[in-house]
Amino acid sequence: QWYEVPPFSGNAIKKVSNKPKGYIADTGLACAAQAISTPQTIGGHPLWGHLFETACVAEIRKQCSFMSPRPQMYHWRAYSGAEVDIILEYDGKLFPVEIKASSHPSRRDTMGIQAFRKRYPGQQIAQGLVLAPIEQALQLSENDYALPWDVAGP
């Protein structure tokens, strides 16, 4: 199954991409299509980052389906190249989430989130999150944190 996350535009006057971002719903199927047959081979595979992002987005999407009201899920990409993987809109607040497959997330990984904040200064924007394969939370900047990817799950 294929699904798309629509773009967040906020202000239509701003220059942002209006294309949705697509994901395959089943990472097992994606791995099989790439001849990845064991968990041990995923980490070193050239598509590791894409597979990790796909798994995290699928889990976020699943968790959002349990909420009422259900958060709106978007992605954001400026023509300049700045990007945020997931923007959750809930109760009038925007929650930017970046997904990185690196086990050493850094402040640099929040550049898309920072660009998003700059682009929409009038919006209520929560602290930014970077989901990564790490063991414990890290503060990356004044408003941004790296969290273990499995906090997106149950």
Image: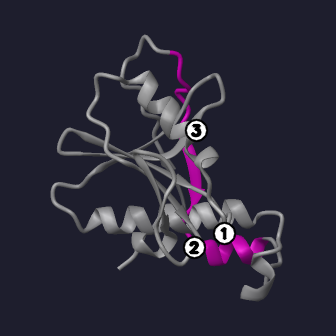
Give coordinates of residue 10: x percent, y percent: 36, 25
Q: Amino acid at mark 2?
A: Ile
> What number is the disc on residue 78?
none
Mark 2 and mark 1: span between their CA atoms?
A: 5 Å
Residue 69, compared with residue 135, is above or below; it is above
Segment colored magenta: 15-33
Residue assigned mark 2: 134
Q: Amino acid at mark 1?
A: Ser
Which residue is at a point 64% across and 78% down the rendered structure image? 28
Residue 26 lies in the magenta stretch: yes
Q: Quadrant of the C terminus?
A: bottom left
Q: Nearer the viewer, residue 57 or 80?
A: 80
**Which color scheme did the rendering employ for the protein?**
one colour
Q: Are marks 2 and 1 in contact (CB under 8 Å)?
A: yes
Which residue is at a point 62% across and 54% down the rendered structure image? 106
In this view, the residue farthest toward the top is 13
Q: Residue 67: which quarter of the image?
A: bottom left
Q: Residue 81: which quarter of the image?
A: top right
Image check: 147 left or right of 109? Answer: left
Mark 3 and mark 1: span between their CA atoms?
A: 17 Å
Q: Earlier in the sequence, mark 3 or mark 1?
A: 1
Residue assigned mark 3: 111
Residue 35, compared with residue 102, is above or below; it is below
Q: Amino acid at mark 3?
A: Met
Give coordinates of residue 29: x percent, y percent: 66, 75
Residue assigned mark 1: 103
